[in-house]
Image (cartoon, rainbow, N blue to C red):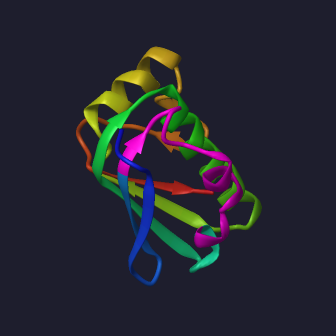
């Protein structure tokens, strides 16, 4: 298991590194949403995600909901194919603010 880390590359740009899985997401991860308030526009780069599962998708949805309540726009880049497949299987690939499009590596979401 690769520990989940949220690393700020520059103001408002965060690289998500490690596993987005049930085993890697802990209570501290769920509680620490402050990084989403760093800017009015946040970019989440998922290029360094190693493994993901449905818990990873649920975490991203929680981030989107939190940002929506704070009127923050989130862009999700480099969504792993594994996450795209889980979203599609769950029927979450084209609802609400989360739109996962295999043709695009950057998915703007207004939250």
Name the residue: 58% across, 42% down. 59
Q: Quadrant of the C terminus?
A: bottom right
Residue 29: x %, y % from top left: 60, 53
Q: Is residue 31 left or right of residue 11?
A: right
Residue, far front: 1
Name the residue: 45% across, 84% down. 11
- As rendered, which of 97 and 35 lies closer to the eye? 35
Residue, far right: 69
Q: Quadrant of residue 15?
A: bottom left
Say whether residue 21 is magenta: yes
Name the residue: 70% across, 67% down. 71
The residues colored magenta run 18-35
- As rendered, which of 37 and 88 lies closer to the eye? 37
- As rendered, which of 90 and 73 lies closer to the eye? 90
Say whether residue 91 is magenta: no
Residue, far left: 103
Q: Is residue 97 above or below residue 35?
A: above
Q: How many marks?
A: 0
Q: Quadrant of residue 6?
A: bottom left
Residue 102: x %, y % from top left: 27, 35
- As rendered, which of 86 and 26 lies closer to the eye? 26
Residue 87: x %, y % from top left: 45, 26
Name the residue: 36% across, 38% down. 1
Residue, far top: 89
Residue 65: x %, y % from top left: 69, 50
């Amino acid at each position: 298991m690769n520990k989940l880390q949220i690393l700020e590359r520059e103001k408002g740009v965060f690289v998500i590194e490690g596993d987005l899985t049930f085993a890697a997401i802990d209570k501290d991860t769920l509680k620490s949403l402050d990084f989403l308030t760093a800017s009015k526009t946040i970019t989440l780069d998922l290029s360094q995600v190693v493994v993901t599962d449905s818990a990873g998708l649920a975490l991203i949805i929680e981030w989107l909901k939190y940002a929506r309540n704070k009127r923050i726009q989130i862009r999700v880049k480099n969504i792993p194919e594994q996450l795209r497949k889980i979203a599609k299987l769950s029927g979450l690939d084209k609802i609400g603010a989360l739109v996962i499009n295999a043709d695009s590596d950057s998915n703007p979401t207004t939250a």
